[in-house]
Image: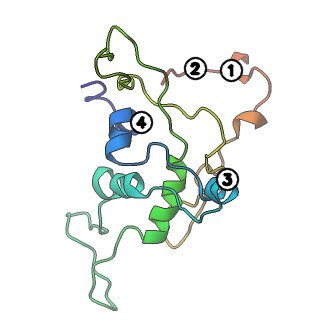
Amino acid sequence: VAHAFNDFKTILKSVAFNPLMAEMLTFKGSKSLAYQVERNGVLLYPDENFAREIMQLFSIGLFMLNEDGTKVVDESTGEHIPTYTNSDVVNFSRGWTNFVDRQDQRDNIEAEWDLGFVPNALEPMELPTSEGRDVFPKTELKVNEKRGYIGDNVPRCDALPPKAWLKKGATYHFR
């Protein structure tokens, strides 16, 4: 399996851009709420399945944990403290919009002539345009009663000086 022994970020990116996973976890072709309202006149939110799976299975789990692995208990209610809310899931699902297959089938690999079109399941998906993508800010999970925005303090690509990667001391990391 590609990237099986890499760091978590690489593995998650590989899973997230895999067309078969996107189909199974139902976020392939998911569009933003704004796109659905403007284009189709319907109030249809982005698919939440993958956002929930990332938080529940791939990263933080259902409940906050103590350092010894036991669940944190809210002293006032006696209940276990959840790591995220449904609002977090709705918010994170906005990040998984407008993913599409990268290219058409390659005849020497995917095509079965008697079945007709078989989509390319090998190449990672892409985000071809911002149309259908949720372009609005997305909040982070609340940590220590504070909530920021994903990407805070990270410069936007269009805010960087021209050819910043060619400046003296710049480094390039292939990902």
Q: Amino acid at mark 3?
A: Arg
Badge 1 vs badge 2, beta-carbon distance below 8 Å? yes
Which x, y percent locates residue 83? 37, 68
Q: Earlier in the sequence, mark 1 or mark 3?
A: 3
**Residue 39, numbered label:** 3
**Which-is-in-front pick, marks 1 and 3?**
3
Q: Residues within 10 Å of mark 1 (few under 14, many from 20)?
A: few
Chain-order first, disc 3 or disc 2: 3
Closer to the N terminus: mark 4 or mark 3?
4
Which of marks 1 and 4 precedes in the sequence?
A: 4
Dot 2 or dot 4: first in sequence order is 4
- On screen, residue 8 versus residue 91, left or right, reads left
Residue beneath disc 1: 165
For the question of whether residue 98 can be seen, the reply is yes
Residue type for callout 2: Tyr
User: For the point 41% across and 18% down, which residue is it?
Assistant: 105
In three-dimensional space, the C-alpha distance between marks 2 and 4, rounded to whole angstroms, equals: 19 Å
Q: Which residue is mark 4?
A: 13
Q: Which residue is mark 2?
A: 172
Amino acid type of the residue tagged 4 in the rendering: Lys
Q: At numbered mark 4, what does the secondary structure look like: helix, strand or loop?
A: helix
- Badge 3 element: helix
Tell me if residue 108 comes above or below residue 139 in the rendering.
above
Dot in front, 4 or 1: 4
